[in-house]
Image (cartoon, rainbow, N blue to C red):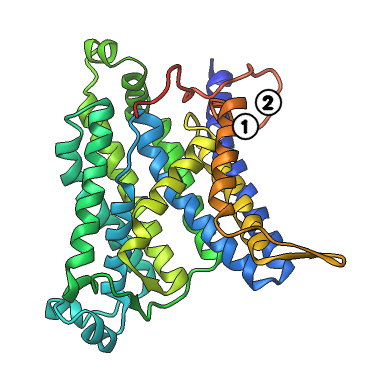
Amino acid sequence: MQAQHAQNRLLSYSTPALLIGLLGVFALLVTLTGDKTLARMAAETLTRVVLVVGLWIFVGNSGIISFGHAGYMAIGAYCSAWLTLKPQMKSLFLPDLPPWLAQAEWPVFPAAIVSGLLASLIALISGAAILRLSGIAASIATFAFLAIVNTVYSNWEGVTGATSSVVGLARYVDQWVALGWAAAAILAANIYANSASGLALRATREDEVAASASGINMYYHRLLSLVISGFFTGVSGALLGHSIGVLNPDSFYLGITFISLAMLVVGGIGSLSGAVIGVLALSIIIECLVRLEHGVAIGPTSITLPGGAQEILIGAIMILVLMLRPAGLMAGNDMKFPIRGGKSNKNNQQPTRSPSP
């Protein structure tokens, strides 16, 4: 029994070790090329890993599709800007900030932590109302939350700059900073998924009635997962802002919502590995398509995709993947170390039915 228990513990930690190792190799290979464009792509990809893994903590365990996580991302991004921008820049772009915030100039790391905590607090408040709903009603409510956040941030001119871009953020996020946060998000997601709350939440995902009859408090576990999810989503917003140096409310609306859900679905919503692999696969495809849109010379000929081809081809790839592998590329399985004598272990996170839309 003790040997089996030790083997199970090793298996549970093998998934984050393999995923972090894979991302580390990805960051190292990009660094070795010396290509600055690829380095920016890698930083953006690893920031998306933080976002999609944060999204998976809630969606993958609860089975409720959330359209509202870009709202938490916006909250984290603007909070980091309020804390880190130089006071002179804030007086120019954000004149209505309270004096204590207008004069603040925090280091970037604690600002990212506080940004995640603020997003968690908003997740707690919004989730307290939204998660009393289930299924498609809860999903629509998350979209309503996103619309509220976008409307507020697009019109709160003295505090967010409204539709004018906030510029001047320190661009400190490279592939290695983003890798560190991606590793933290993967570890936290794995710990939560294997915790008593994570196991209970997946039980409610499979059968709400049976889980409720067993005494599982579905509302509490969903709310807890949303709060944890909100933290990493908020941090991903801070990372994105400090990667490109510019903030605009439209950066945190429908585009980022649908691409993050696409990455989660393509990789496989039923496993943590699926979330990470989905980000890597689609990010590499997007980078290739962007380069083809700008034109790629092959010998004497140049191949150039027409404008808008990127979105069409990504949509076609998604349809193809879902036709061939409805459960995603990882099919609900996690990457694990092969252990002699261990049972062939499908991820205990694999859904037996499709998550609620």
> Residue 134, position in %: x, y?
23, 26
Taking depth in this image into account, of 316 and 194 the one nearest to the observer is 316
Residue 227 higher or lower than 207, as above or below: below
**Mark 2 neighbour density, 10 Å: few (under 14) some (14–19) many (20 or more):** few
**Residue occupying image coordinates x 32% and y 44%:** 228
**Residue occupying image coordinates x 42% and y 70%:** 242
**Mark 1 neighbour density, 10 Å: few (under 14) some (14–19) many (20 or more):** many
Residue 133, image quadrant: top left
- Quarter of the image for the N terminus: give it: top right
Q: Which mark is residue 339?
A: 2
Residue 199 higher or lower than 90, as above or below: above
Residue 195 visible? The answer is no
Residue 241, image quadrant: bottom left
* Residue positioned most to the front: 306
Which residue is labeled 1 in the image? 336
Q: Is residue 232 left or right of residue 322?
A: left
Q: Amino acid at mark 1?
A: Lys
> Residue 214, position in %: x, y?
25, 11
Question: Helix or strand or loop: what does disc 2 sit on?
Answer: loop
Evaluate if marks 1 and 2 touch, with contact meaning CB atoms under 8 Å apart.
yes
Q: Amino acid at mark 2?
A: Ile
Residue 263 higher or lower than 310, as above or below: above
**Residue occupying image coordinates x 73% and y 66%:** 32
Residue 219 visible? The answer is yes
Q: Which mark is residue 72?
A: none
Question: Helix or strand or loop: what does disc 1 sit on?
Answer: loop
Between the C-alphas of marks 1 and 2, the distance is: 9 Å
- Quarter of the image for the C terminus: give it: top left
**Residue occupying image coordinates x 54% and y 37%:** 266
Q: Is residue 289 left or right of residue 119?
A: right
